[in-house]
Image (cartoon, rainbow, N blue to C red):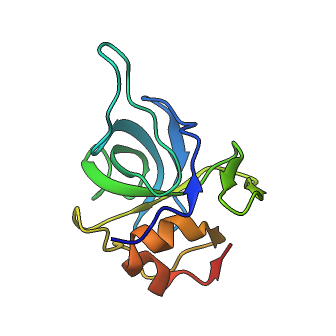
Amino acid sequence: MKAITSKVTRALGRGAYIPVCDNSGAKVVALVSVKGSKTSKGRYSAAGVGDLLNVVVKKGAPDVRKKLMPAVLVRQKKEFRRLDGTRIKFEDNAAIICKDDKGNPKGTIIKGPVAKEATEKWPAIGKVASIVV
C-alpha cells in the first residue's frame, strides 16, 4: 500500500447533502455512513476526501433514486494539508457514485477537478478523471 500523502480533515458529517459530479444519473446524495471509519464511542463518523461512503440518492433519475449506493468523496470545501505543507481546498463538495466497494465509478465522465488523494487511493477514478489537482 502507498504511503499517505496528506492529512485530510474530515469535514462532512452524517446526513450531509453532497452534489454528484459524474454522469451516473444521480444529482444529489445524502451521506449515511463512512466505510472503515473509526471513532470514539457515540460519535458519528465524518468523511474527508478519498473516503468510501454509503449514500442514498435524493435527487436524480428515477432508476437510481432512494437507493443505497457506495460513493467516493473527491472534493471538499474545508481545506486540508498535504505533507509538503501546501493546503488544498475546493469551491464545492462533490462525490462520485461507484458500482462496487472496489471504487469503480458508475459514470464515464467526471465533471470538474478531482483531488490527488482520491486518485491515489482509488486508481479507477484517476483513469476517468480529466483534471487531477
Give above or below for 130 relative to 31: below
Left or right: 104, with 13 as reference point: left
Query: Residue at image x 61%, y 84%?
Result: 130
Q: Quadrant of residue 64?
A: bottom left
Asked whether residue 23 appears in the rendered view, the answer is: no
Is 31 left, or right, of 67 in this rendering? Answer: right
Residue at 53%, 65% in the rendered image: 117
Compared to residue 1, the image places residue 6 above or below, namely: above
Identity of the residue furthest to the top in this view: 42
Point out the image quarter for the C terminus.
Answer: bottom right
The location of residue 24, given as percent across then percent down, is 40, 68
Q: Quadrant of residue 62?
A: bottom left
Q: Say whether residue 33 is left or right of residue 131.
A: left
Residue sitting nearer the eye, 88 or 14: 88
Numbered label tally: 0
Specify whether 20 is left or right of 69. Answer: right
Quadrant occupied by the N terminus? bottom left
Q: How far across and how far down the image is residue 89, in percent?
A: 74, 53
Q: Which residue is drawn at the image coordinates 37% and 80% (left, top)?
A: 124
Tell me if residue 20 can be seen.
yes
Residue 30 in percent (x, y) is at 42, 39
Q: Which picture quadrant has residue 113?
A: bottom right
Q: Position of residue 65 (x, y in %)?
A: 32, 49
Residue drawn at 47 percent across, 58 percent down: 50
